[in-house]
Every structure is written in C-alpha cells, then in structure tokens.
Image (cartoon, helix red, strand yellow):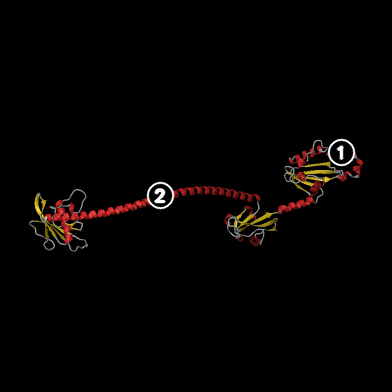
Amino acid sequence: MLLNNDNEVLHVYGDVSAYVSVRQGDMSYDIARLVSAQVSAAIASLSRLADKTGKSVKSAPLHCVTEDKVCPVSLHLTPLETAPSGEKMRILSFLTADQQSYGVALAEPHMQTLDDLNETRFVALQQELLETRESLRNTIEELETSNEELQATNEELLASNEELQSTNEELQSVNEELYTVNSEYQEKIRILDRLNNDLDAMAQATGIPTVFLDDQLNISRFTPSVSGIFELRDADIGRPLSDFSNKIGYANLITDAEKALTTAKLHELVWETDEGKLIIRHVPYIDAITKKTALVLMFLDVSSLDRLDFLQTVLDSLPEHIVVLDGDGHIRLVNEAWTNFARENEGELHSIGVGAQYLSACRVSPQSRDFDTATEVETNLRRMLDGEIDVFSVEYPCHSKKEQRWFLMHAKRFAANRSGLVISHINTTSWHRSPAAVSSGSDTSEATHSNE
C-alpha cells in the first residue's frame, strides 16, 4: 500500500482484503481506521522509526486473523527517497512467513520485535506527553498573560464606559440646550416670516415701486408695483440692476445710485414723465447681516399731489369760504378764505378745520336764536349725504362785535356718484347795505332772520 506522510492510503498493490476492513461511519483513507488496533499501533511505531532513521524498517511477525485463520504477518515499511509531488511517501507491505520481500531493492531492514515496537511507541507517547505538558504549560502562561491583559482591558473598558456615560450625560445636556436653541430659532424664524409677510403686504398696500439693492447694486428684493418702471421677475433676484432698462427714460439711474451708495447720503430728484411726475429717492442703509452699505430705490408718484396743489391754489384764490366734506360729513379740504375767517373771528380751527366733523359744528344750544337755522342746515346736509337732495341754500346772519354781516350758504353734492359735499359761504353784507335794503328797513332784517 502506498501511504502519504499522514499515513493515508493513496494506492493499493495486490489483494490486501485479508488485512484491511472498512469500518462503519464516514469513509476515511487513514490506515489506522482500515486495519486492526494491533497492526495500527505497529504501523505508527514503524512510521516514526522510518522518519527518524530514513531507512526501511520491518516488524516481527504479528498475529493477524485472515479467513478465520491466525497467521503470522510481518509489516515492511519503506520510505521513498523522492516522490513525484515532492511529498514524503512510504510503502507498506504485508509479508507472510512463506513470502519474500519485494518492491524496491533495499538493504535488509532491521527486524523490530513487538517489544521493540511497543517500547518505541511508549517512548514516542512519553515524548509526546512531555511535549504536550510543556505546550500546555506555555498555553496556560499565555492564557494567564492574556487574562491579565483582558482584565486590564476590561478595567480600561469600564473606565471608558464611565467616560462614555459622562459624555452621554453631557451630550444629553447639550441636546437639551440645542433643543432650546432650536425652539428659539424656530420662533425667530416664525417672527421673521411674519415680518417678511407684513413687509410684503405693506409694500403691496402702499403701491410704491421699490427696489432693494445690495452693495454691488444687485437686486435683492422688489415690490410688485415696480413693474411700471422695470420688467422684473422673481428669477431676476441677484442680477445687477444695470442689466435692465427703465421705462421712464432715466439714463443716469445707475450713476446716481452708485453715487448715493458711495457717499452713503440720501439722493433725491424730481423726474417728469408723460404720465406725471415722480420723486426718485436713493436711500442708503447699513445691511444688518453683511454690515455693508445697501440701497433702497423708491419711485414716488406725486402727480395726484400736484393736482391737489393745483386744486388748493384754485380754491385759495376764491374769496368765498369753501369747505369740502366726505361721505361721513368730515372736513377734507378748506380754502385760505375759510381758515382766515375762522382765525379772525377767534374760531377753533380744530373744530372746523380739516378732519373735524362739520355736522357737529352746526349744532347750537336750543336757547340760541340761531337754533332753528342750525337745525335746518344740519337736517338738509344729512339729506344730501343720504342722496335725498342734491342742492341746498340758505342765508343767515353772522354778526360780530364790530359790524353786522350776512352770508349765503350753498351746498352741492359731488357728481359722478361720489359721496361728499362742496359748501361755499358768500358774504352778502353788501346786498343788505344797498339802497333797496336800507329803504325796506327792519322788515328785511326780520325776513332774513326768519330764513335763518
């Protein structure tokens, strides 16, 4: 039988069924599991001896049971000097008493008796035991060293665990602080969102075209009403204002903006267009985030103010006392003659000036001799405000300490379905001082008083 270095069967030559049997269980090519215990012990001893000497060895006859007979058989183990694979191999031969040695031509091996084999096996087992004890001792020492290292490592791990617990507590504390800070930031974000919405609502409510520029004159924000000046979209935020032309023909817009940004001073000018008049304001300010100077560009339409100034100029040029009421009877506009008359006659401007309630000023005490006229005026003015009548006139005396005076009050509702009144007071004193009025005497005075 051809065996490898681990005594596994690689090849069989001849019939060895008399010496080999397959045991129950997993299949194995180990020679120790294929032969009897006595033969297995002898093969182990011969293998050690052959490895030690490097020569062929032969055992004394062993009693082997073959075909229900007990016959002596010798084991012949020959190590191969060179194997094709480079692995150590050996040939095991089973020789009966009437057989001669065969195989490779070798010198006659030394005969190993059973006592020699047992002695060799005993010495080998004793040596293995000593080696095993030494190895076990070294292993125990290594285990003790490893155990000490593990204990030290365990102590370090315990210390690390305590540190981790402390760190975890600190992290929990930091997490609570971060949660608090996050809540504060969320509240600030909500406040900023509300302020931003309020700012947008205010920009839409005022209707003033406004553009917010950064320190490089790039667009950072604009109001919807600026579409009458520039063609801007939300996607244009961040672009330079110089990329866009204005619709009002203001060629020096960027130059004036750069000047206001450089000097950090308010720059304002009046610009007239085909549709009216604008006040263009360059308002620099410090950005709270970047700490740099930014700019607000505002376009104020003052065309209505010009028209109002023109209307005020026209009214101030009239000698009659003019007052304009809104739909609730509040004074919205007076002329210079009205204001001067009130000042000269020690009237209270807050009660008959702009913003005052005109109908309340018409009320007098029931004991006054002007009570009937005042009541008639208030009643008819309310009817006019309610749309019942369009025109009302009445003449009334308004005597002072120095002279006797008469005035004609004329009220007219607004046209074009607008709620409000225009009231004029004309001084008619000269009419009462005419020759016809003098000849009529007191009758005219009494008739006029009755109309009051």
Residue located 27% across and 54% down the image: 139
Q: Position of residue 396 (x, y in %)?
A: 83, 41
Which numbered disc flags the more N-terminal residue, 1 or 2?
A: 2
Residue 293 figure quarter: bottom right
Q: Is residue 116 above or below residue 364?
A: below
On screen, residue 372 versus residue 52, left or right, reads right
Q: Quadrant of the C terminus?
A: top right
Q: Is residue 53 above or below residue 337?
A: below
The reply to whether residue 231 is visible in this rendering is: no
Residue bearing mark 1: 447
Q: The residue under label 2 is which amino acid type?
A: Asn
Report how many numbered discs are placed on residues in the image: 2
Residue 374 in view in this figure: yes
Q: Secondary structure at mark 1?
A: helix
> Which secondary structure, mark 2?
helix
Mark 1 or 2: the one toward you: 2
Along the horizontal axis of the image, is 27 left or right of 445? Answer: left
Residue 102 x, y percent position in the rendering? 11, 60
Q: Residues within 10 Å of mark 2 (few under 14, many from 20)?
A: some
Residue at image position (83%, 43%) is: 408
Q: Which residue is more in the foreground, 30 or 290?
A: 290
Residue located beneath label 2 in the image: 161
Residue 449 sits in which quadrant? top right
Left or right of 190? Residue 77 is: left
